[in-house]
Image (tube, helix red, strand yellow):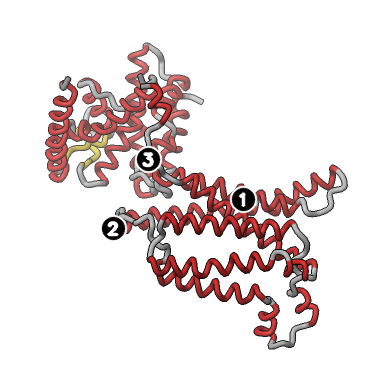
Amino acid sequence: MADAGAYEKLELELRRGVVVLATLSQLRKPRYGYELRQALAEQGMPIEEGTLYPLLRRLEAQGALSSEWKIEDGPPRRYYSLNADGRKLLKKLTESWQGLNHAMKRLLTED
Amino acid sequence: MNANDVIDSYVTEVARQLPRRQRNDVAFELRALIDEGLQDRAEASGRAVDAALATEFLQAFGRPEDVAARYRPMLSVIDPADGRKFLRATVVGLAVLWFLGLLAALQQPLDSGDDFVRALAQWWVRTVIPSMWWPGVLVVGFGLAAWTRRRWPSTAVWKPRAPDRIHGGRFGMALALVGMLCGVYVLVDPRWLLDVVWEGRAAAVAYESLTYTDTFLQRQAPWLLGLLLLNIPFFLTVLAVGRWSATLRRIETGLSLLTSAALVWTILDGPVFKTEVSDTTAKVLAALIVAFTLMTFAIKAYRSVKPMPNPRLQAQR
């Protein structure tokens, strides 16, 4: 069997593949970085801060997210949410993920 | 340092590596996010926010260089697929340069340990340090190749290539044949070059330096000339056939090995030219030709592919 180091690397690659989709899925409503991280963690998808916060800026630069500074209960926070292009991207990636998921389910349940 | 100082230094290190237009905005956001995360961590672990906890938290966050890099699209100068090729070319190139430089440095008289150390110091200064141009050239070359592939992906599409094709095509081979004929003509009597360049008015010593010794003319010259002349009908045949067959490859290998053997004999035997300088130059050139030929064979053997199952795996079945 592959060693523990190999497992960790492969598991990390698997997770990397879904980080973007997981992030987009939680931005149908505006959220700021830390809030988003907690929302993802509560649903079983913890993402390191050092990965998540830069990802939000990259997705914004790619035109999938919009953001604005807001002051609600606390210090100023930058809130991110899907824009029209982001919603289309989420839809396409969701379909793609579901296709992959079905295929993997079939593959992994075969004798 | 207190926790604030630790966070400030981290945020500054990340932000400094970002483009100026987003630097301050990201720094402000990152600072707020770290503060909030750290506060929650302290509450969860029942500790006070201090420099030690902040350092621990930020170490888990990642190196500032890595975090800053994640804010921008990934940039790789050399394609990861080219990494091993680049490393191999760098190591082999440097090894050749250093070896040749060492040989040159050790040419001077070495009568004592001090002389040897001096020669090594010269080798370090004149060869090793200046040799860094080679990795630089490779970075530029591999970088340009990677950029071209990204800019014009169609240039990188794989195309089938016949293994028996003639490199450079028939035209290239015809040109090579003409060059070969000219080379043979010059080698038969190199003094002809002096007549062409100086119209027969070159100094007598120049003619003497390009005059073969009688020993060479009687011993190695007929063999070398014969082998060189054999190349002409051989390459004419390749040109006519239009491709390299297995037999033609075998003949080429045989001819190259025989020519190398004749050159080694020439190097080890008596002088080729009447003056020492031209004789040494000719032998160095001959040695380089032999080294190049043998190296080509070694590389071909190393790179050859013969599809077959791994015998060790077969034995395990």
Residue B147 against residue B30 in the figure, above or below: below
Residue type at numbered disc 2: Ser
What x and y, as percent, mark residue B14? 42, 38
Q: Please indicate whether residue B67 sits to the left or right of residue B257 in the image.
A: left
Q: Residues within 10 Å of mark 1 (few under 14, many from 20)?
A: few
x 60%, y 57%: residue: B258
Tag 2 residue: B154
Q: CA distance from mark 2 to mark 1?
A: 35 Å
Answer whether labels 3 and 2 touch (C-beta < 8 Å). no
Residue type at numbered disc 3: Pro
> Quick one: quadrant of the C terminus of chain A?
top left
Residue B99 against residue A7 in the figure, above or below: below
Q: Which mark is residue B276?
A: none
Q: Chain of mark 1?
A: B
- Badge 2 element: helix
Q: Please indicate whether residue B241 sits to the left or right of residue B260 in the image.
A: left
* Mark 3 or 1, nearer chain start: 1
Q: Chain of mark 2?
A: B
Q: Are marks 3 and 1 on the same chain?
A: yes
Which circle, 3 or 1, is nearer the viewer?
3
What x and y, as percent, mark residue B195? 68, 84
Q: Which mark is residue B307?
A: 3
* Mark 3 or 2, nearer chain start: 2
Q: CA distance from mark 3 to mark 1?
A: 32 Å
Asked where in the image residue A99 lies, by quadrant, the reply is top left
From the viewer's side, name the closer residue of A111 and B308.
B308
Residue type at numbered disc 1: Val
Q: Chain of mark 3?
A: B
Q: From this viewpoint, is residue A29 visible?
A: no
What x and y, as percent, mark residue B283? 71, 62
